[in-house]
Structure formats: C-alpha cells, structure tokens
Amino acid sequence: MELELEPIKLEGVSEERPLIISGPCSAETEEQVLSTAQQLAQKGVKIFRAGIWKPRTKPGGFEGVGVEGLAWLKEVKEQTGMYVSTEVATPKHVYECLKAGIDILWVGARTTANPFAVQDLADALKGVDIPIFVKNPVSPDLELWIGAMERINNAGLKRIGAIHRGFSSYDKKFYRNLPQWHIPIELRRRIPNLPILCDPSHIGGKRELIAPLCQQAMDLGMDGLIIESHCNPDCAWSDASQQITPEVLDYILNLLVIRSEHQSTENLRELRSQIDDCDNAIIELLAKRMRVCREIGTFKKEHGMTILQTGRYNEILDKRGAQGSLCGMDSEFVRNVFEAIHEESVRQQMEIINQ
C-alpha cells in the first residue's frame, strides 16, 4: 500500500534542510531539562527532545522519570517557545503525552520491531493529528519498518516521518549500530515523499562520530537530524558517551555542508551513460557466468557430485575479496557481491540436477 502523507510543517520552523531535533537522551531533573533547553534555544534549535520513559536492555538501569518529566517539557514550551517531543511505547504513554500537550512523538526501535505494540500505539492515536516519527527496527528489516508506518497511517495519521538510527549487530566494532545506509536509501526510493531523519547519536554511540555521521546523512539527502545534547553530558544518567553539549552541537551544525538536491544533472549525462554501459556489461558477464555454471551442474549430475564444493567456494571468496581490495574496493563489499553470485549459481545448478 502507499502511505497517505502530509508535510510535517511547524510554524516558526524552517522547511530548509536539515530539520534539527535535539535534547538529552533522558529527562533527569527539571534543572537539567530546562538548562539544556535554554542553551539549545539560544543556538536556534526549535524542537526539543527528551526521553521520559527509557526502555533498557536489562532491569536495574535508569528507566526514565515517567509522567513527572512531562511537566518539565511543558515548562520548556512555556519558557523557550520550543516544540517538545518524546518517545512513546505504550498506549498509556500516548494518553499521558496528549494530555500534557506534547507536540511530536516518536516510536523507538524496540517498539517498531513488535507489530502488536505498534498496533496498540496506532489504536491509541486514532483520530489524533500529531506528527509522529518511526525509528527503524533494531534488525535490518525494511518491511517491518514500513509496516509500522502503515499501521500508524491506517489509524488516520498522515504527518509521519522515519528516523534512521542504525541496526544492531552482535559484533560492535566501530559503530554502536551499523548505519547500513542502503536501507534508508531504499526506503526513500520506495516512499519518496517520506521525511527521513538521521540519528547519529545512536548510530555512532560516541560523540566524536556525530559530526561525520551528520555530514554523511546530509550528503545522502536526508531531511534532518535528531541529536542527543545535554548540558553536562559526562554526568548523564544514560548514554553519556554519545551526548554532546549545545555548544558542540552548534559548532557541528555550522560546519555542515548542505548540498543542493535540485541542481541540474545535465553535466552528468555522459558519466551516467558510462555507468549504463558498465551495468550492461556486468549483466552480460553474469549471464555468461551462469551458462558456465549450468554446464558445471550438468557435469556434476552426470558424475554424481554434490553441488556445493566448500573448498572452491572459500577460494573464490578469498581471491575475489583480495582482488577487489587491490582495485580500490572494500574487500567485504566484494565478498558480499560474490556470495550473492554464488547463491544464484547454486540455484541454477539445482535446477539442472533436479531436471
């Protein structure tokens, strides 16, 4: 289905890229919330964020101040004129936020991963006109992400946006959550008019990664950024390592290069023609490779051999990865390409053997 969307327009908030939402990971105290909000307002930020309820991986951690914090967000609105936003995960959260006059809601990654929980939120939001952003699920599942937005859209909400916060990985090396940029890129291709924000705080997990991730998001044409900012980040009660001060946030935003999305691409015509020629050649070579694979399948069938030859498969992956690296490509990317090619080769040989 197609989402029925309306633009997320907020009075006094520029429609120019990037839309900025910022504030602490968690609302901790009234003083911390108001101090951070006032500093951000002085830097020109128009939308304040703070977690009121915090889903934690394990029990025992700080799980948010709860309803009490909503009064602090109301105070932020009154003192600074900023719009205020927070995460909701249950119908009760929705009711409390609507009662408190919260302007914008978002659905967290863990909630997005659960269709039952999303449907409960959608039912609670039925008949309400409020902007709501949906974070990607913790797993790299685009259909689950789109499905969550469809459920909310079916409840009558049309001011919907997406937040790309990266995807969980067992092997955390560099990023807290892997960006896997191809997924939000495909989301943009599928739903062109859907606003997509990037959450560099949760992708990076470290404050030193926020600036480069912000620039990457802008270079990929994302509409905005939701960045965690705290008046004293080192003392934050949750996710201290990924929060920055309002002053650092202002510095990062001032250094961003915002490239035009609408500039003429006429001068790229020749280069794009070369890309098309390369793609056509790749398709022809793949077709030739598959013809050879089918001949191999015939040979294996006639000689009673198994399709999968593990030693040969590992040899291909290792050699092609090394070759790709020598040609200036990421070896892991090349391995992924040849894993996909091998999967199709096996499928072709299975067809031959089963004939």
Image (cartoon, rainbow, N blue to C red):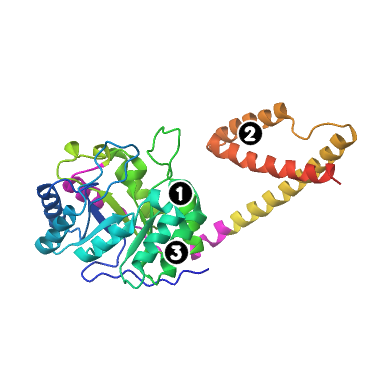
Measured as percent of width and height from the top left, residue 265 is found at: 48, 64
Tell me the residue that label 1 is attached to: 181
Left/right placement of residue 110 relative to residue 355 reads left
Left/right placement of residue 40 relative to residue 137 reads left
SS label for mark 1: loop
47 and 56: which one is in front? 56
Whole-number angstrom distance, CA of label 2 to CA of label 3: 43 Å
Q: Which mark is residue 320?
A: 2
Residue type at the position of mark 2: Arg
Measured as percent of width and height from the top left, residue 166 is found at: 41, 46
Left/right placement of residue 145 relative to residue 53 reads right
SS label for mark 3: helix
Q: Residue furthest top?
A: 311
Residue type at the position of mark 3: Arg
Picture residue at 37% right of the left edge, 38% below the top: 176
Left/right placement of residue 221 relative to residue 344 reads left
10 Å crowding of disc 2: few (<14), some (14-19), many (20+): some
Q: Is residue 195 visible?
A: no
| Magenta residues (range) | 243-272
Q: Which mark is residue 84?
A: none
345 and 94: which one is in front? 94
Tell me the residue that label 3 is attached to: 151
Picture residue at 60% right of the left edge, 55% below the top: 274
Picture residue at 71% right of the left edge, 26% below the top: 311
Measured as percent of width and height from the top left, residue 292 is found at: 80, 41
Whole-number angstrom distance, CA of label 3 to CA of label 1: 24 Å
Residue type at the position of mark 1: Trp
Q: Is residue 248 visible?
A: yes
